Image (tube, rainbow, N blue to C red):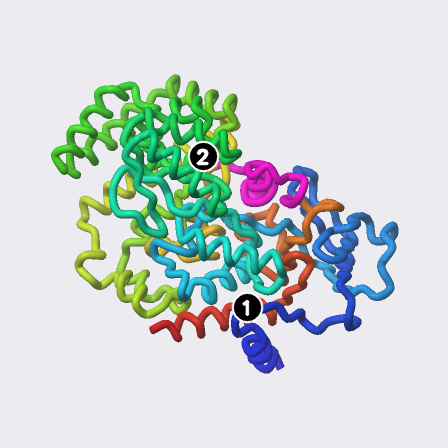
């Protein structure tokens, strides 16, 4: 029977067009979850034996089973033994550019996200036209997918203009780029690299005028403290934004050494400068930086799981990864771990391992200091799979000392807060959007239990396990069909 149901759903979602599962009275848009344990992500303890009433795309009531009146025509789901959490947000993805060609990613990655309980994403660099088009379809209800917040092409100091990249050489070009992206529908501005501090300040100033925030990498011409003071809303990555230099007792000396190495294209020397910054960690300098992040409201998106650690660089593990079936053949070939160019030397693997260890340390220190932190995967980097990689990142947060509730909040409540949309989603409360995940096990015992998904509710539409399995099957078929 389950196989038949799966075939039905695959046939019903050829283009991810919505067709509601046939459960409960026909014609109803109300759902009632009964006897469920609610983990609302506000910080409250788990609330057992709750009733949650959903009408349309909103939660209209949450409370003890005996006190909540149920609509007579609602679809009732007995959620006894299940745990309800807010829908997850992956705050750093690339789903329509870089490795993800919009020609196929719409049919492959959007279902993967939902099947993994991810009901919202922040795209950090990609084809803005495609992303805006998908966003409109999703919001209109004609396309099944997560909420999308998108930057479009990132700003860079050089290179050719492309769907993923917008080069700017000076302050005038930077301001014009911000205005153009705003007009095209960008939700914020992403920075990769910039040629000078003056250009950064021009971007920040113009973005503020246009009502946009700025996120991205810390340019090599600046420090994390400087971009935080300038109003950068979120700093992406620990390693790639070079936070280790800001925390080094030899900061000026080592920044200069790295810059000189880059000018000479001496990557080994640049890598040594990073290593020396790691080992010259200053608790006092780090504490001052963390205090600044807190005072300025600067969010950090660590993306630790995206680093090419040994787990991700061992060909024997990579070649057997079952998630490869969700990638087109061309991308699988590009990622092929048996190719010499995809096999790091022993020295390279050791260097990346040291960066992972240092990132883990800095994440732990930032969390202890109260720095606001968001969960983001950096998918679709090589072997950073859309969907599961967010759960892996969350598990690293727990290992770094976060309580499970704090991890959950980094991907739910805090995602909403960082976007200025906490009144809309991020917690399980009356009035919030009905983007929810129903789990088979308690994530407050172990955050890895967010992988144990029984059902997903997206904008009030209930996707049971059969529907989620069908989405996975659809993604696999769509990936295999790519020429």
Indicate left or right for 328 with 466 as reference: left
State the image coordinates of residue 185 (x, y, percent, origin top left). 49, 47
State the image coordinates of residue 204 (x, y, percent, origin top left). 43, 29
Indicate which disc residue 53 carries: none
Residue at 45% from the left image edge and 44% from the top image edge: 151
Q: Is residue 73 above or below residue 48?
A: below
Disc 1 is placed on an element classified as: loop
Q: Is residue 215 above or below residue 135?
A: above
Q: Quadrant of the C terminus?
A: bottom left
How many tags in the picture?
A: 2
Within the image, what quadrant is residue 326 found in? bottom left
Disc 1 marks which residue? Answer: 16
State the image coordinates of residue 481 (x, y, percent, origin top left). 39, 75
Q: Is residue 97 magenta?
A: no
**Gap in Å between the C-alphas at discs 2 and 1?**
32 Å
Indicate which disc residue 214 carries: 2
- Res. 37 in view: yes
Range of magenta residues:
401-426
Disc 2 is placed on an element classified as: strand
Indicate left or right for 271 with 394 as reference: left
Residue at 74% from the left image edge and 51% from the top image edge: 59
- Viewer-proximal residue among 249 and 132: 132
- Res. 395 in view: no
Residue at 83% from the left image edge and 53% from the top image edge: 65
Number of other residues with Cα within 10 Å of mark 1, as a class: few under 14, some 14 to 19, many 20 or more: many
């Amino acid at each position: 029977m389950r196989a038949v149901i799966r075939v039905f759903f695959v046939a019903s979602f050829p283009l991810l067009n919505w067709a509601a599962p046939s459960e409960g009275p026909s014609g109803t848009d109300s759902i009632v979850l009964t006897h469920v344990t609610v983990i609302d992500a506000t910080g409250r303890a788990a609330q057992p034996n709750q009733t949650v009433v959903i009408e349309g795309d909103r939660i209209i009531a949450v409370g003890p089973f005996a006190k909540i009146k149920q609509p007579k025509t609602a679809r009732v789901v007995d959620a006894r033994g299940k745990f309800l959490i807010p829908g997850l947000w992956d705050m750093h993805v690339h789903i329509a550019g870089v490795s993800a060609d919009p020609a196929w990613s719409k049919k492959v990655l959007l279902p993967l996200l939902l099947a993994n309980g991810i009901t919202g994403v922040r795209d950090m660099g990609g084809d803005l036209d495609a992303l805006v088009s998908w966003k409109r379809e999703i919001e209109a209800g004609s396309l099944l997918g997560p909420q999308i917040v998108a930057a479009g092409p990132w700003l860079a100091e050089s290179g050719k203009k492309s769907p993923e990249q917008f080069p700017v050489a000076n302050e005038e070009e930077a301001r014009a780029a911000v205005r153009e992206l705003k007009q095209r529908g960008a939700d914020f501005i992403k920075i990769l690299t910039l040629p000078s501090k003056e250009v950064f300040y021009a971007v920040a100033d113009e973005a503020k005028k246009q009502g946009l925030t700025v996120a991205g990498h810390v340019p090599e011409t600046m420090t994390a403290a400087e971009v935080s003071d300038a109003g950068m809303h979120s700093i992406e990555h620990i390693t790639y934004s070079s936070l280790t230099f800001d925390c080094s007792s030899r900061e000026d000396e080592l920044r200069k050494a790295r810059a000189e190495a880059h000018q000479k294209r001496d990557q080994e020397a640049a890598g040594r400068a990073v290593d020396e910054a790691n080992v010259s960690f200053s608790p006092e300098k780090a504490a001052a930086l963390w205090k600044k992040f807190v005072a300025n409201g600067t969010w950090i998106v660590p993306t630790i799981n995206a680093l090419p650690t040994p787990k991700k660089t061992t060909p024997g593990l990579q070649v057997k990864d079952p998630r490869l079936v969700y990638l087109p053949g061309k991308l699988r070939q590009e990622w092929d771990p048996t190719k010499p160019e995809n096999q790091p030397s022993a020295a390279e693997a050791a260097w990346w391992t040291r960066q992972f260890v240092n990132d883990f340390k800095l994440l732990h220190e930032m969390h202890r200091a109260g720095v606001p932190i968001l969960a983001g995967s950096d998918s679709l980097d090589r072997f950073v799979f859309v969907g599961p990689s967010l759960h892996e990142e969350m598990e690293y947060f727990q290992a770094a000392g976060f309580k499970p509730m704090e991890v959950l909040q980094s991907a739910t409540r805090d995602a909403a807060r960082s976007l200025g949309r906490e009144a809309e989603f991020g917690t399980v409360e009356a009035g919030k959007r009905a983007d929810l995940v129903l789990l088979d096990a308690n994530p407050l015992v172990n955050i890895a239990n967010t992988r144990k998904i029984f059902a997903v509710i997206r904008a009030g539409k209930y996707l049971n396990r059969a529907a989620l399995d069908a989405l996975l099957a659809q993604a696999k078929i769509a990936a295999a069909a790519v020429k």
